[in-house]
Image: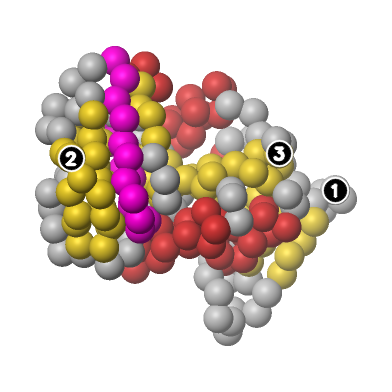
Amino acid sequence: MKTCLVITGGSLDLSFAEAFLKERRFTRVIAVDAGLETAKKLDLIPDVAVGDFDTVKPEVLEEFRGMEHIVWDVHQPEKNETDTELALNRAAAMGCGEIAVLGATGGRLDHLIGNIHLLYPCMQKGIFAYLLDPQNKVYLLDSGKDFFQETLWGKYVSFLPLTQTVTGITLTGFKYPLFRKNIEIGTSLCISNELAEEEARLDFEDGVLICVESHD
């Protein structure tokens, strides 16, 4: 399966990114606009550069423009999609089945909320896409999932409805179990749960959940 790393132009903890990349290898790397500056700091040469490039420093843009193998996906600033959406579309078009997005959670809240929503069309295409920062791993679920202590991103696991209603939620092996509970937008019932055992299980009948694995 092809995997893709998307580096957006949002704020990113470089020490975290360096540690993360030491443990992971990706088939493709996409830099989004000012994400080129982060790629430079991480000594990464992207396969694709996407965006309108209105925020990247001119000298950094010029340096990468001189690299022959980079594919440039250039757009006008006045457009319907954000640069991050264009990058996710590009990753999907390249046949990537997993997309890790760095730099998508810091900074403006409208971009953060929008980036979470951008995970939905990826999920519809069968792509596992997720946002990462030092504290959080955010992704969507439309079916059940097993959770393991040894691979959990942090101590806490939260579930929030992306659709109006998520029905039949059953949590097994969690500190706060549930049995066939329905939740709707506007509830905080499933926030800050924890695994009570080495393995836990989420099941639900219908809807889409935002899952956040996190730690303090």
Q: Secondary structure at mark 2?
A: strand
Please give the range of residues in magenta. 198-216
Seen at 15% across and 64% down, the residue is: 186
Q: Amino acid at mark 2?
A: Phe
In the picture of the structure, the residue carrying the numbered disc 3 is: 2
Q: Earlier in the sequence, mark 1 or mark 2?
A: 1
**Inter-mark Cα distance, 1 to 2:** 53 Å
In the picture of the structure, the residue carrying the numbered disc 2 is: 179
Indicate left or right for 69 with 180 as reference: right
Q: Secondary structure at mark 1?
A: loop
Does the rendering let one see residue 5? no
**Inter-mark Cα distance, 3 to 1:** 19 Å
Measuring from the top left, give residue 16's x and y in whole percent.
42, 31
**Inter-mark Cα distance, 2 to 3:** 37 Å
Does the rendering let one see residue 118? yes
Q: Amino acid at mark 1?
A: His
**Mark 3, other Cα within 10 Å: few <14 / some 14–19 / many ≥20:** some
Seen at 20% across and 62% down, the residue is: 184
Measuring from the top left, give residue 155's x and y in whole percent.
24, 27
Q: Amino acid at mark 3?
A: Lys
Indicate left or right for 144 with 98 as reference: left
Seen at 33% across and 64% down, the residue is: 163
Residue 211 belongs to magenta span: yes
The one nearer the camera, 55 or 74, is: 74
Q: Residue furthest right?
A: 68
In the picture of the structure, the residue carrying the numbered disc 1 is: 69
Quarter of the image with the C terminus is top left
Seen at 76% across and 61% down, the residue is: 72
Marks 2 and 3 close (CB-CB < 8 Å): no
Measuring from the top left, give residue 143's x and y in whole percent.
42, 45
